[in-house]
Amino acid sequence: MSDTIFHKIIRREIPADIVYEDEHLIAFRDIAPQAPVHVLFVPKTDVATLNDLKPAQAEVVGRLALAAAEYARQQGFAEDGYRIVMNCNGYGGQTVFQVHLHLLAGAPLGRFGTSR
């Protein structure tokens, strides 16, 4: 397994505010939230970017999305709405090179997709 901050959280080498975990993934609150609710869903499968996923690994992304949707329902904000985002490489905004999904919610999120 690689040695990103996410891998260290999975291995319990550094603390995190974990909100969900199963045999396939872990979810924890982002330390620099971009919305009132900002949770990261990270697979335990070691994959650096979306570009590195193989067709046979499609379930990795599916599990992340389904876990995020279930979390939104359980926390009571699914009906109001939420956003899920996956960044890929530098121009896409990826800073930790382990595939992960951002769940953002808790307020109107506004327009999305403009460059800085």
Image (cartoon, rainbow, N blue to C red):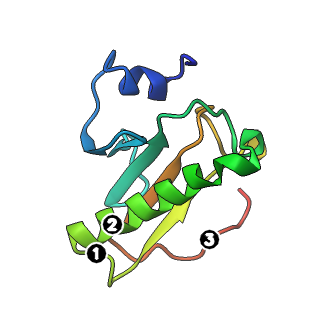
Name the element at disc 1: loop
Q: Nearer the viewer, residue 115 or 64?
A: 64
Q: Earlier in the sequence, mark 3 or mark 2?
A: 2
Residue 65's place in the image compared with 78, above or below, is above
The quadrant holding residue 52 is top right
Separation (CA) of disc 3 from disc 2 = 23 Å
Q: Amino acid at mark 3?
A: Phe
Left or right of 82 on screen, residue 74? left
Separation (CA) of disc 3 from disc 1 = 19 Å
Q: Residue at x 59, y 76 (%)?
A: 111
Tell me the residue that label 2 is attached to.
Answer: 70
Q: Which quadrant does the N terminus fall into?
A: top right
Q: Residues within 10 Å of mark 3 (few under 14, many from 20)?
A: few
**Residues tagged 1 and 2 counted as in contact (Cβ below 8 A):** no
Residue 26's place in the image compared with 72, above or below, is above
Q: Residue at x 70, y 48 (%)?
A: 56
Position in image of residue 82 (x %, y %) = 42, 72
**Residues tagged 3 and 2 counted as in contact (Cβ below 8 A):** no
Position in image of residue 12 (x %, y %) = 31, 20
Tell me the residue that label 3 is attached to.
Answer: 112
Q: Amino acid at mark 2?
A: Glu
Residue 64's place in the image compared with 51, above or below, is below
Q: Amino acid at mark 1?
A: Phe
Q: Earlier in the sequence, mark 3 or mark 1?
A: 1
The image's mark for residue 34 is none
Position in image of residue 27 (x %, y %) = 36, 45
Q: Residues within 10 Å of mark 2 (few under 14, many from 20)?
A: few
The image's mark for residue 77 is 1
Closer to the observer: label 3 or label 1? 1
Separation (CA) of disc 1 from disc 2 = 10 Å
Q: Which quadrant does the C terminus fall into?
A: bottom right
